Image: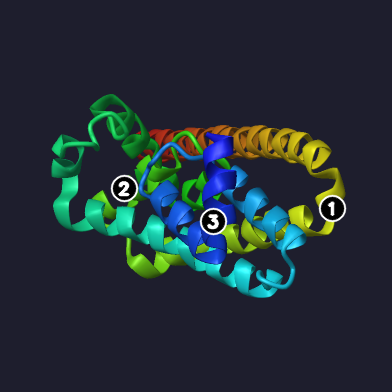
Amino acid sequence: MESFVINFVESYLIIGVFLLLFMCGLGVPIPEDIILITGGYIAYLYPDSVNIYLLILVSYFGVMLGDSTIFFLGKYLGPQVITLPGFRRIFTGKRVATLTQYFISHGAKILFSARFMPGIRSTIFLIAGMTGTSFFRFFLFDGLAAILSVPALVYLAFHFGEQIDHLKVYIIRMKEAAAVVIIAAVIIWIVIRRWTKKKETYYIDKEEEKIVEDERG
């Protein structure tokens, strides 16, 4: 897969990066990180043919266009999307059902975190559309995450082109660590919120019991 990405980007340069990122956003199993790193590395190899700042801008729009397409498929086709040919393997019914429950309660946080969860990112954006999330809300949180990740990966590969192999390993480890931290933070936040609500409910019940006892007394 990596060799295909390198050959494709080397042949079509910025347009190649845009097309691959768009397909990745649709759920095609091409690692987004590899595309962005390859784009930055190609800019390092061919600085006269590839402007790094234009590449970053085009990469961002490629990412957001792919994500937005999946969002609108979920918004206007709903659950029928997972029955379409080519989508059944990507958006399994079990995965959609499980993520929908989490998304309804924690949509904003999951939208932002999805950028760092390549295995389920497209499914989350599909669910965002299916559950009636506004496009502004979706674009805001997904766009903020993309603003952080896209320029960083492209520019790092461009700036450290001579150490690209070491950089790939480092970035992959950093992304894995970031995903673990984000997932852990979301879980901790959910646990704390549930505990707080349970505590509030306990005190409300106690207050009601006291009022009832006072009325009886």
Q: Secondary structure at mark 1?
A: loop
Query: Which residue bears the numbered disc 2?
Result: 126
Pick the front one: 86 or 131: 86
Q: Secondary structure at mark 3?
A: helix
Mark 1 Cα-neighbour bin, 10 Å: few <14, some 14–19, many ≥20: some
Badge nearest the viewer, 3 or 2: 3
Q: Which mark is residue 170?
A: none
Q: Give the percent coordinates (x, y) of residue 216.
A: 34, 34
Q: Is residue 108 left or right of residue 189?
A: left
Pick the front one: 164 or 123: 164
Q: Name which of mark 1 and mark 2 comes first in the sequence.
A: 2
Find out whether the residues at labels 1 and 2 contact each other: C-beta distance under 8 Å.
no
Residue at the farthest top position: 94
Query: Which residue bears the numbered disc 1?
Result: 160
As measured in the structure, the alpha-carbon distance from the residue carrying label 1 to the one carrying label 2 is 35 Å
Query: Which residue bears the numbered disc 3?
Result: 11
Q: Secondary structure at mark 2?
A: helix
